[in-house]
Image (cartoon, helix red, strand yellow):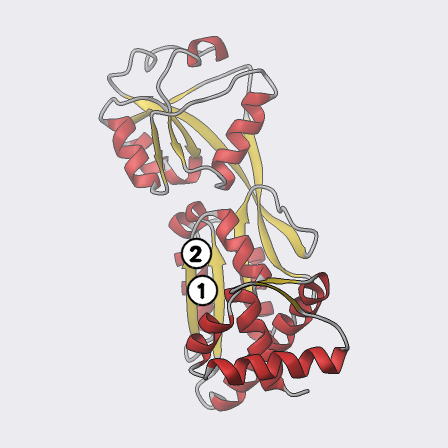
Amino acid sequence: MTLKHIRIFAAVYQEVSVTEAAKKLNMTQPAVSLAIRELERHYETKLFERYGRTIRPSGVAETLYEYASQLLSLYDEMDAEILNWNVGGNLRIGCSISIGTCLIPYYLKRFKEEYPELQTYVKIDSSDVIEEMILENKLDFALIEGMVHSDKIKYESFLEDELVTICGKSHHLSEKENVSLEELKQENFLLRERNSGTRELIETEFAARDFFIKPVWESTSTTAIINGVTAGHGISILPKRLLDEQIRLGQIIPLHMKEISFKRFYYIIYYQKKHLMPAALDFIEIIKRHDSF
């Protein structure tokens, strides 16, 4: 068994197809099939169940893939670091949209001051996508808001966050000193997409009070939601860090609610078996040191 066998297995597992794996690896289909058969002989077990032209990973394959993905990730890290020894290597960072909007540019600036030659890749997406990329070893570590859903991911909080209910300055609730939950039930909501950390917190808190929202807008873009609220299309609930400038300019109005609050933490996450290179650990220390800008 060689590293090539493991890489071929991982591609077949990810694509759930020998044909697609062969295309991805620029190999012939028979060569990919042979490598899988050799692995199955080595472990004396079936890795994929075959159903006509389709395949399905076995339970053993799922366990093997966990180790294989970590092994390949560690090898790729080693390969990249040694090949780029004179220019500093590279680092893959993920973050949720809220953090990517208001924090990661500043964290990255501080990091670049200490590691000017190191190449960084940043992926900004919803928390569930980022978490999946951590599990697939497509990222070294990530910053997300909200709950972590896999017990295979380590996490630690680094910053407290608060969501704020907002409306446009011409909205009929804008001049109320306090807004009740019952009043919100009559309003149109503009919200982040399902499975985002922000949306998950909102729905959890409201569901605990028998309030279930059907938004009139859904978007991965917080800017689009803020613009929609400013234009008077409804109300929203978003991280306060994203709203400070618009609130200061009077473009949007924060609504005060006594019955409910939306507090949460931001988390640093990485795969529990992940070997974090020194640069990644230093980046995490920068995050912990600089909680605001």
Report helix, strand or loop for mark 2: helix
Specify the amino acid type for callout 2. Ile
Report the residue at 42% width, 60% height from top. 123
Q: Residues within 10 Å of mark 1 (few under 14, many from 20)?
A: some
Reading the image, the residue beneath label 1 is 110
x%, y% of residue 155?
65, 53
Report the residue at 49% width, 72% height from top. 91
On residue 104, the disc is 2
| Residue 56 visible in image | yes
Report helix, strand or loop for mark 1: helix
| Residue 250 visible in image | no
Which residue is more in the foreground, 292 or 14? 14
Q: Quadrant of the N terminus?
A: bottom right
Which residue is more in the foreground, 52 or 260? 52
Which residue is more in the foreground, 173 or 136? 136
x%, y% of residue 57?
63, 63
If you read the primary sequence from the N terminus, does the residue marked by circle 2 or circle 1 appear first? Answer: 2
Horizontal side, residue 223 vs residue 265: left or right: left
On residue 129, the disc is none
Vertical side of 200 occupied by 293: above or below: below
x%, y% of residue 247?
33, 30
Vertical side of 169 occupied by 275: above or below: below
